[in-house]
Image (spheres, coloured by chain):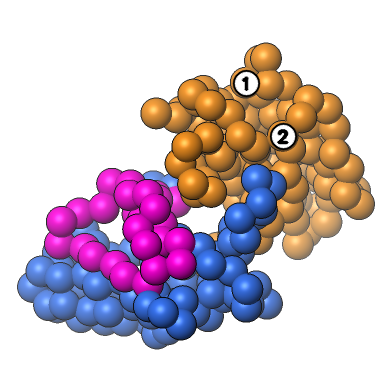
């Protein structure tokens, strides 16, 4: 089976940087994904990591350490519209391409 | 717009009833996934179909069933509905590459009264 842990809530200030952590345990790791989900809306894909290191995409970056079972999502120059839930998801080998999701981190961006 | 279409957007029904949720995947995607999201839980994987065949099953109740048709659209059937089945039901589709993300539809909000 798989186990994914993320903080439940975080608060940050507009214009600041925030790091959302995710730890996971899985047999047969085959990739880690980050999604953003606004309340009542569909999750939208942000990033994908399968090798160790940092992937940068505009204001969003994601880091992976496979040996530690650890990832983080870094959001820079926070904007009010970044207030949302951020979901960490893991893909395992042998399970098709399905994703197992963590319960999400609710980020609140304040003025 | 993800390219994944789900209907209906909202469903309100009574306990004991049966409903069908429909999903059309993105053009070119052969895989369809169904997820349930309740208020107190994250996205729970229900089932995965690839090109008409069941590929993987999650914690899907026996009262729930799904299928994928030759035109690749999928339907999720929920029967003998209970209050606890009230949730957002998402369909997603993907390509087959290892790094292919899931693209989600806008979901069907089911309310069982």
Q: Secondary structure at mark 2?
A: loop
Q: How many marks?
A: 2
Q: Position of residue B65 (x, y in %)?
A: 23, 65
Q: Which one is earlier in the sequence, the residue at label 2 or at label 1?
A: 2
Per the model, the C-alpha gap separating discs 2 and 1 is 12 Å
- Report whether A95 appears left or right of A80: left
- At horizontal 44% and vertical 51% (from top left) the residue drawn is B43
Of the numbered discs in the image, which one, if any, rests on residue B10? none
Q: Residues within 10 Å of mark 2 (few under 14, many from 20)?
A: some
B53 falls in the magenta region: yes
Given residues B37 and A31, the one toward you in this image is: A31
Read off the chain for label 1: A
Location of the N terminus of chain A by quadrant is top left
Residue A103, compared with residue A69, is above or below; it is below
Same chain letter for marks 2 and 1? yes
Residue A29, compared with residue B62, is above or below; it is above
Residue A81, compared with residue A4, is above or below; it is below
- Report whether B40 appears left or right of A96: left
Highlighted magenta segment, given as a residue range: B43-68
Location of mark 2 (residue): A50
Q: Position of residue A74 (x, y in %)?
A: 80, 38
Read off the chain for label 2: A
- At horizontal 31% and vertical 70% (from top left) the residue drawn is B67
Q: Secondary structure at mark 1?
A: loop
Chain coloured orange in this rendering = A
Res B50 → quadrant: bottom left
Q: Look at the image and give the colour of chain B.
A: blue
Q: Position of residue A10 (x, y in %)?
A: 65, 38
């Amino acid at each position: 089976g798989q186990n994914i842990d993320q903080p439940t809530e975080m608060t940050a200030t507009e214009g600041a940087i925030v790091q959302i952590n995710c730890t996971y345990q899985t047999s047969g790791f085959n990739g880690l994904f980050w999604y953003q989900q606004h309340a009542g809306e569909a999750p939208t894909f942000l990033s994908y990591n399968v090798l160790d290191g940092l992937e940068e995409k505009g204001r969003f970056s994601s880091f992976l350490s496979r040996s530690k079972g650890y990832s983080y999502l870094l959001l820079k120059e926070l904007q009010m519209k970044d207030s949302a839930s951020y979901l960490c998801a893991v893909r395992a080998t042998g399970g098709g391409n399905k994703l197992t999701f963590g319960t999400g981190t609710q980020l609140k961006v304040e003025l | 717009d993800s390219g994944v279409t789900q209907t209906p957007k909202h469903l309100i029904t009574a306990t004991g009833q049966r409903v069908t949720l429909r999903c059309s995947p993105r053009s070119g995607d052969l895989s369809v996934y169904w997820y349930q999201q309740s208020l107190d839980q994250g996205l729970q994987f229900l089932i995965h179909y690839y090109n008409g065949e069941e590929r993987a099953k999650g914690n899907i109740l026996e009262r729930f069933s799904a299928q994928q048709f030759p035109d690749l659209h999928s339907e999720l059937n929920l029967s003998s509905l209970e209050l606890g089945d009230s949730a957002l039901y998402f369909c997603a589709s993907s390509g087959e590459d290892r790094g292919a993300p899931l693209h989600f539809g806008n979901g069907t909000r089911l309310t069982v009264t």
